[in-house]
C-alpha cells in the first residue's frame, strides 16, 4: 500500500483481512492505512472469543488508540484490568505507562475495534512479560530480540 495522498473513504468489509493465530492469540486485521510513509496507521481489528490480539506490550515512540465498536473486552494495564465496551475509546501513550493487552472474554461474540496509531520513523515495542523487544525503522520491523542478550557497547569491536 502506498502513502495516503488524498481523502480516503474505505469500507473495511471490502478489505481482505490478515489472519494471525497462535495459541491464545488470534486476530483479523483489515489494514486501511499502512505505517510506512504515513503519519498514522489505521486498521479494523477483530478478536475472536477467548483470544487476545497481542501480548502485553508498550511502544517507545507511538501512541495507540482503540475505539470499541462491537463486543466487550478486558483491557489489562499497569493500573489493573477494566472491561471496555462499544463507545469506549482507549488511548495508550508511549512508554511503560502505556503497557496494554486487550482480550476478548466472550464465549460467542467477536470483539471489533478501530485501531489508530501514530507513527514514528523509529519505534521499539517492548513485551515486558517475556522480556522481548522489536525495532521498527521506517515501517520495517526487525526482531523480536530478548533483552537478556544485552551486550557491552564495545562488545565485538
Image (cartoon, rainbow, N blue to C red):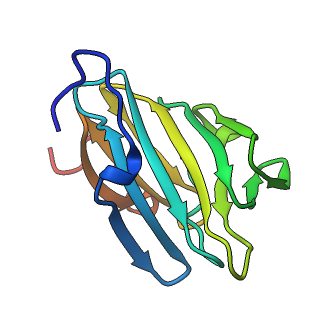
- Percent position of residue 59, x then y: 51, 40
Classify residue 31 as left or right of residue 138: right
- Percent position of residue 129, x then y: 61, 65
Above or below for 116 versus 149: above
The residue depicted at 34 percent of the width and 40 percent of the height is: 32
Classify residue 123 as left or right of residue 126: left
Task: In this rendered view, identify the residue nearer to me: 22 or 132.
Answer: 22
Q: How many marks?
A: 0
- Percent position of residue 149, x then y: 38, 61
The residue depicted at 29 percent of the width and 37 percent of the height is: 34
Classify residue 56 as left or right of residue 153: right
- Tell me where residue 145 sits by quadrant: bottom left
Task: In this rendered view, identify the residue nearer to me: 46 or 94.
Answer: 46
Classify residue 8 as left or right of residue 70: left
Above or below for 56 versus 152: below
The residue depicted at 67 percent of the width and 72 percent of the height is: 109
**Location of the C terminus (image quadrant):** top left
**Location of the N terminus (image quadrant):** top left
- Tell me where residue 154 sits by quadrant: top left
**Is residue 150 visible from the viewing direction of this image?**
no
**Is residue 31 visible from the viewing direction of this image?**
yes
Task: In this rendered view, identify the residue nearer to me: 20 or 46.
Answer: 46
The residue depicted at 48 percent of the width and 33 percent of the height is: 117
Task: In this rendered view, identify the residue nearer to me: 77 or 25.
Answer: 25
- Percent position of residue 113, x then y: 58, 49
Amino acid at each position: 500500500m502506498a502513502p495516503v495522498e488524498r481523502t480516503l473513504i474505505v469500507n473495511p468489509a471490502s478489505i481482505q483481512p490478515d489472519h494471525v493465530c497462535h495459541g491464545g492469540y488470534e486476530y483479523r486485521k483489515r489494514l486501511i492505512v499502512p505505517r510506512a510513509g504515513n503519519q498514522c496507521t489505521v486498521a479494523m481489528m477483530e478478536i475472536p472469543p477467548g483470544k487476545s490480539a497481542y501480548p502485553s506490550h508498550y511502544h517507545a515512540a507511538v501512541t495507540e488508540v482503540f475505539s470499541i465498536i462491537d463486543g466487550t473486552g478486558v483491557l489489562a494495564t499497569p493500573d489493573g484490568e477494566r472491561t471496555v465496551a462499544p463507545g469506549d475509546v482507549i488511548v495508550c501513550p508511549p512508554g511503560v505507562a502505556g503497557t496494554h493487552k486487550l482480550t476478548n472474554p466472550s464465549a460467542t461474540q467477536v470483539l471489533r475495534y478501530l485501531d489508530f496509531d501514530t507513527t514514528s520513523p523509529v519505534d521499539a515495542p517492548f513485551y515486558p512479560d517475556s522480556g522481548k523487544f522489536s525495532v521498527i525503522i521506517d515501517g520495517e520491523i526487525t526482531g523480536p530480540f530478548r533483552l537478556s542478550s544485552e551486550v557491552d557497547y564495545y562488545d565485538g569491536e
